[in-house]
Image (cartoon, helix red, strand yellow):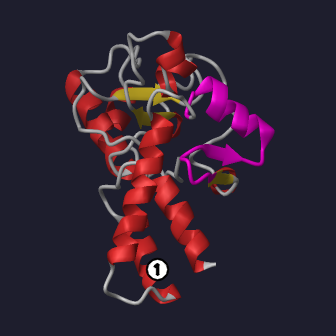
Amino acid sequence: MILIKKKRIPSSLVEYKRTINASFDNLPREVKDRLRTSLLKEQGYICAYCMKKLEDDSSKVKIEHYVARNEENELEYKNLLAVCKGNEGESFEKQTCDTRKGNKEIKINPQVNRDILTIRYTSNGEIKSNNSDYQRDFDETLNLNDIFGLVESRKEALNSLKRKLSKSKTHLTEDTIRRIYLRYSEAEIKEAYVGILLWYLQKKMK
């Protein structure tokens, strides 16, 4: 999970919200497509929760309500995130992200920097926080430490970065590592599981 900086609400959504009986379920396809694209762009085309790569495809992306939707918040742009399908259709044990979460409340907010700063990782790919509520979100509500793939995928992403750094012909000074960090953090299209990569590079800089 990385910090998501919300940008300007799409004009098509602003206009739709002004219509009579506007609701999330009745979003016109064109408005929903533009909304999904906007969310993906500000997230770097990764899932807001697990950081899997996402394509701008309605069959592969869900628009999630961070706070369970109601009449007041269902079209609030700050309450909307782009997320993966989270093993939709699989058993509950294998579900992740919004599919697993459903209407449950989570405490950690990917739009709040102080929340994201509590996150760390293990070299084995587990996501951790020193906040017990956030850890419960990871382990139970979102199932981000599932044994069916996410932990192993983060571990492999980290090991791939380590291999690249070890093969680098450039001396890895603090400035060099900082440039690599900025390249990952500022990329318009983020690497899958980029959170663990940024965490590791920050450790190297320290």
- Which quarter of the picture shows residue 84? top left
User: Disc 1 marks which amino acid?
Assistant: Ile
Q: How many marks?
A: 1
Graded by Cα atoms within 10 Å as few (under 14), some (14 to 19) or many (20 or more), the crowding at tag 1 reads some
Rendered location of residue 8, percent (x, y): 41, 51
Q: Is residue 143 magenta?
A: yes
- Which quarter of the picture shows residue 15? top left
Q: Residue 188 vs residue 116: left or right?
A: left
**Residue under pointer 1:** 177
Q: Nearer the viewer, residue 183 or 15?
A: 183
Q: Nearer the viewer, residue 135 or 38?
A: 135
Residue 49 lies, with reference to residue 176, above or below; the image says above
Rendered location of residue 149, percent (x, y): 44, 32
Residue at x-position 54% and y-position 15%: 93
Rendered location of residue 64, percent (x, y): 46, 28
Q: Residue 175 vs residue 54: left or right?
A: right
Quarter of the figure that contains the C terminus:
bottom right
Residue at x-position 61% and y-position 51%: 122
- Which quarter of the picture shows residue 144? top right
- Residue 18 in view (yes/no): no
Q: Residue 122 vs residue 176: left or right?
A: right
Q: Is residue 125 magenta?
A: yes
Residue 31 lies, with reference to residue 196, above or below; the image says above
Residue at x-position 78% and y-position 44%: 131
Q: Which residues are magenta?
A: 121-144
- Residue 152 in view (yes/no): yes
Residue 121 lies, with reference to residue 87, above or below; the image says below
Residue at x-position 55% and y-position 26%: 73
Helix, strand or loop at disc 1?
helix
Q: Nearer the viewer, residue 77 or 202?
A: 202
